[in-house]
Image (tube, rainbow, N blue to C red):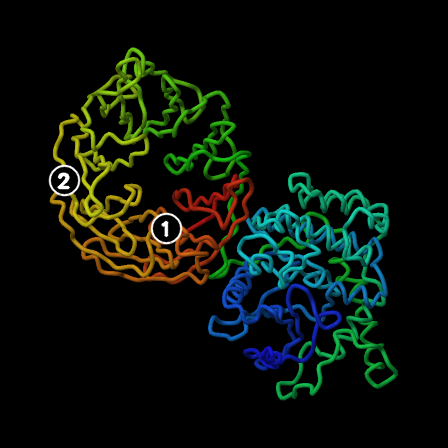
Amino acid sequence: MEPQRPAEPTRLGPYRIIGTLDAGGQADDARRRIARDDRTGHTAVLMLPHETLADDPGYRVRFRSEGENSRRLTGGWAAPVIDVAGPEADLPWVAYACFPALPLPAALAAYNGPLPEPTVRALGAVLAHALANWHAGGLVHAGISPHATLLMADGPRLAGYGLVRAAGLNGPDRGASFGVDAFTLPPEQRAGERPSPAGDVYALGAMLWYAATGRRDVAERTRAALPEGLRELLAACLAQDPGQRPEPGTVARELRAASAPEAVGRLPDVVAMALARQAAAYPAQAPMAAQARPEEAAATPPPGRSRRAVVIGGLSGAVGLALGAGGVAGWRAVGEGTGSRETSARRGIAPAPLWRHDLGSEPQQTPLLWRGKTALIWTTDSVSALNLRTGKKIWSRDKLYPMSALTLLGNGTFVSPDTSAFSVVSLATGRIKGVERRYDGVEGPAIYQFLGADKDICWFLTRKYANGGTGTEDHSVVCYDSARRKEVWRAPLPAPYQGDGDTTALLLSTMLLLPSQGDDADTSSYLALDRRSGRRLWTRKFTGMKDESAKQRLVAPGDLLVSCDEHMLRGFHVAGGKERWRVATKGRVSGTPTAHGQAVYATDSRATTYAVDVRSGSTRWRRRSAAPLESSWTRAETAVSHSGATVFQVTDAEIEALDAADGSPRWRSALAGKGQQAAGPGQVVGVAPGIVLVLNGTILYALPVD
């Protein structure tokens, strides 16, 4: 016999449950209750996990995290969050300041059937416009459903932010899970893909289909039940291919355009009456000493001839007046400006992006930033330059055909390697300034990797083929002056330092450091070359450096070489090779540490970020993210703003901005992506004065910082 599930609590934090908002007492995605705040006497709407998921620790963490993130939704059509349960709460909850309100199923029950077409159009127009604003700000709602759509006298509100993400970070069969409204779940998310802006459009279309037909079935056979004016648009929203669905701004314009000027799209009288009955049953503000009701009443109690009915009659008139005057604005087929006013910035809420740019195709390398003014972008289709302040494209070229990573020079040009040559290209215009063909692999050696650049000088690795290409010899490092188009020096490379085309060289003020390959498990070594002459300075072993990849090493101030292995950060003195300090970490540090000033920052597989003093090795602070990693093998990255005032902790769930002084959280973000590589919240791919760049798939965002 299964143990009996405990009864739903009647008190959650400062809130007393006094009623239910769910039509029929239940919903597929979450529970919504009417509650009274004992501190203020105000009535609020509480969202709780679906009862079958209330005991799942992972779901509780994700549910609370999404509730916190929903504070970032701006504009008038997001259910305003006033409280979120703390991490110590046994049962998470989110409190909304939107009452009286009817979930869409309750509104259809009150109307005794589908809503009129003008009301559906107005509902869809304002919510599609809200989605357009949220998507432009990098937010995917991932929780639109009939129960999450709340109708109020002055317009609709969307609750339920992130319920799809809370139900499962990834994996198939989401539609079979509690906590998700399978009716509104797009097919690509059923297959295990992450939520996307196109998925929000599908969910909006399904919700409007339900509002217009009363049916939770979007199959072709039910299309005839739709009003003729909505059929084509909603069918497009529900396209199986996400790429065939319209943008939410287009949906909003089409819904507005087909509305007659005199159709204000007001709520039907019987729905307004249901809101009035709800307001009478649960006053918006009760005396502080009021006692809890002994029984839980329905969200839309049936009318009856009683003293309460007299009050209802008066209230319904008041609701009608509100709809006929200022309150009707929310139910019009709104213009572009309605409901889009930004909320003021608050600590904990990510700033709105300065701009958003769709690269159009998958990026081939991290954007290269020049002097805080220009971003150089290489995608599968083209090479282009963006203005960092506006996000506008300066130029784009589809005939450069780089065969390996671009290298940015310090003189306003960049190197684009080809199969038998490399071009020096103007960053301002995209025009080729010169082509170097002497390293073609036929008459001379072939380039197999660029290592780095400083001003006009760049360094690269070459090898010369012998015996008809069946063997190689003469591996070298070449120093090249791009302005004079002249080789400055060439130095032979011993076998351990020849690399395989993926070498991570380290540039110091006077030296070029090249890592070895095939060292012992407990030892790594470096070859140091003089940057000006190519003279071999030394080779040195660093005992105890166990990390498998040189990509996880960096040079910190004081000529300190920092590396990380599974559960340790280590600092080595470059000149002597001796270990200076070590810091134990709780999880595996698999990402690349980053340094700024006298501190090194790294994030481990437990989503804990460490700030370490490079001089002493002491830990200044550590901060664990509220959103845990999916597994101990997930990579976690760390970045620092240009000024050094903000540290970015990047996990598979979110980007968290931390105060570099003490590790305290500033804000959290999870920006929407697009394309095959869009997953998670995005990655910090660059910083410039006042700007942090975040890339998710093909979408590049610039967020203000510091």
| Relative image position of residue 188 (x, y in whole percent) | 62, 47
Q: Is residue 76 left or right of residue 444?
A: right
Which one is in front, 402 or 327?
Answer: 402
Viewer-side label of 2, 1: 2
| Relative image position of residue 254 (x, y in whole percent) | 76, 43
Name the amino acid, label 1.
Thr
Q: Is residue 487 left or right of residue 273?
A: left
Residue 638: numbered disc:
1
* Residue reaching furthest to the front: 1
Name the amino acid, label 2.
Arg
Look at the numbered disc 2 and give the secondary structure of its residue: strand
Q: Distance between the Cα atoms at labels 2 and 1?
A: 28 Å
Q: Is residue 677 left or right of residue 575?
A: right
Q: Which residue is mark 2?
A: 540
Q: Image quarter for residue 71?
A: bottom right
State which tag comes first along the sequence, 2 or 1.
2
